[in-house]
Image: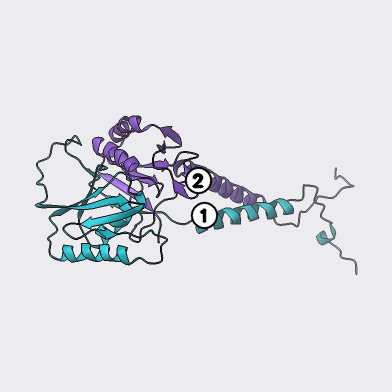
């Protein structure tokens, strides 16, 4: 028996559901990428400038070491060289003494590991050299100094 | 004139109005995309010989050491860095924000002039004092790369 009363509805609007699905996926993708990038690359580091820096061709097996001046050690734009900076790897603080063992483990897990060193440009070389020595002790052949263009 | 047939049926949208949400979501998407595009790219100076220090490293190698090893000594006096490139006189470095970059240009020229008389089988060792700023070390390393030195190493901090 045919029903009378309400007639079937025809939605004349464009169906935006797939659009919202795709856009939401893109937003989630950008947010996760941003979070991961922020964890890896500490944005408080003022990296040095260099005119001949190049992009890394192979991004696999990279390990970012962030070296940041300790809180309170910067006065009027100058970093107190006597204060030991903080070292962060994958968002976690690592002591200078523990860094060599850390790199050694990473080297065993990924033999072709590439270290990316992101250090404050105002830090004294006295704090950078032990990190380079730790890389050499772990037999890491590729050390890449993070720079920004002039 | 009144229309007849199927078009006469009126559409009734009973669902929520998605238009404001789509507007906001698209704005957020554009913000993220522009933000990602505007970020200053980081570039890298790559070193394959990180530190020159006897006894480091675990590989036993028969590879021949470079025939010539030359030092670039960097010292720090009164908040100024001086660079002694090989056998030349020390040259005063300027800060990167200093408009006068003549000292830095002299260092770059000295490195390039020396390289013109050398083969590729030479190792340059940058030997900075403890208090030399990291930026100055990178500037000198950048000059070495510009002068096409193939093997550049870093010594442990001196002094």
Q: Is residue B119 above or below residue A135?
A: below
Task: Let me know if residue A111 appears in the view.
Answer: no
Q: Which colour represents chain B?
A: cyan
Q: Is residue A7 above or below residue B93?
A: above
The residue located at (17%, 63%) in the rendering is B114
Question: Within the image, what quadrant is residue B111 found in?
Answer: bottom left
Tell me where residue B34 appears, x and y as whole percent.
55, 58
> Is residue A71 or residue B146 the one in the foreground?
A71
Label 1 chain ID: B
The residue positioned farthest toward the bottom in the image shown: B1
**Frontmost residue, B100 versus A42:** B100
Q: Chain of mark 2?
A: A
In the picture of the structure, the residue carrying the numbered disc 1 is B36
**Coloring scheme used:** by chain
Query: From the image, which quarter does the C terminus of chain A lie in?
Result: bottom left
Q: Residues within 10 Å of mark 2 (few under 14, many from 20)?
A: few
Residue B78 position, x and y percent, is 35, 51
Query: For the residue labelled by badge 2, is the local secondary structure a helix, a strand or a loop?
Result: helix
Residue A105 image position (x, y, % from top left): 31, 31
Quick one: SS at disc 1? helix
User: Picture coordinates of residue A45 (x, y %)?
Assistant: 45, 47
> Total number of numbered labels?
2
Q: Which residue is mark 2?
A: A33
Judge from the rendering whether residue A85 lies leftward or rightward of residue B132; answer left or right: right
Q: Colour of chain A?
A: purple
Q: Based on the displayed image, in which of its 4 quarters is residue B119 positioned?
A: bottom left
Which sits in the foreground, B17 or B58? B58
Viewer-nearest residue: B40 or A96:
A96
In the image, taking residue A20 as reference, residue A70 lies left or right, namely left
Residue under the image location 63 percent in, 52 percent down: B28
């Amino acid at each position: 028996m045919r029903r009378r009363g309400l007639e079937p509805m025809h939605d004349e609007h464009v169906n935006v559901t797939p659009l919202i699905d795709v856009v939401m996926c893109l937003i989630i993708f950008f947010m996760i990428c941003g979070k991961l990038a922020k964890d890896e690359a500490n944005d408080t580091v003022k990296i040095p400038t260099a005119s001949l820096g190049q992009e890394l061709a192979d991004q696999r097996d990279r390990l970012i070491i962030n070296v940041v001046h300790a809180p309170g050690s910067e006065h009027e734009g100058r970093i107190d060289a006597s204060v030991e900076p903080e070292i962060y790897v994958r968002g976690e603080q690592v002591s200078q003494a523990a860094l060599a063992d850390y790199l050694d483990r990473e080297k065993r897990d990924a033999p072709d590991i590439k270290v990316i060193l992101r250090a404050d440009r105002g830090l004294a070389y006295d704090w950078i050299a032990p990190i380079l020595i730790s890389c050499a002790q772990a037999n890491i052949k590729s050390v890449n100094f993070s720079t920004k263009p002039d | 004139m009144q229309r007849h047939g199927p078009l006469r049926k009126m559409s009734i949208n009973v669902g929520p109005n998605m238009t404001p949400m789509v507007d906001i979501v698209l704005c957020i998407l554009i913000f993220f995309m522009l933000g990602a595009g505007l970020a200053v790219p980081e570039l890298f100076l790559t070193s394959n010989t990180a530190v020159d220090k006897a006894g480091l490293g675990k590989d036993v190698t028969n590879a021949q050491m470079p025939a010539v090893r030359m030092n670039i000594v960097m010292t720090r006096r009164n908040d100024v860095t001086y660079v002694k490139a090989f056998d030349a006189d020390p040259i005063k470095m300027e800060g990167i924000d200093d408009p006068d970059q003549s000292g830095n240009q002299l260092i770059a020229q000295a490195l390039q002039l020396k390289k013109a008389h050398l083969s590729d089988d030479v190792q340059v060792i940058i030997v900075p004092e403890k208090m030399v700023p990291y930026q100055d070390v990178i500037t000198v390393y950048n000059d070495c790369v510009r002068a096409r030195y193939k093997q550049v190493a870093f010594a442990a901090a001196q002094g």
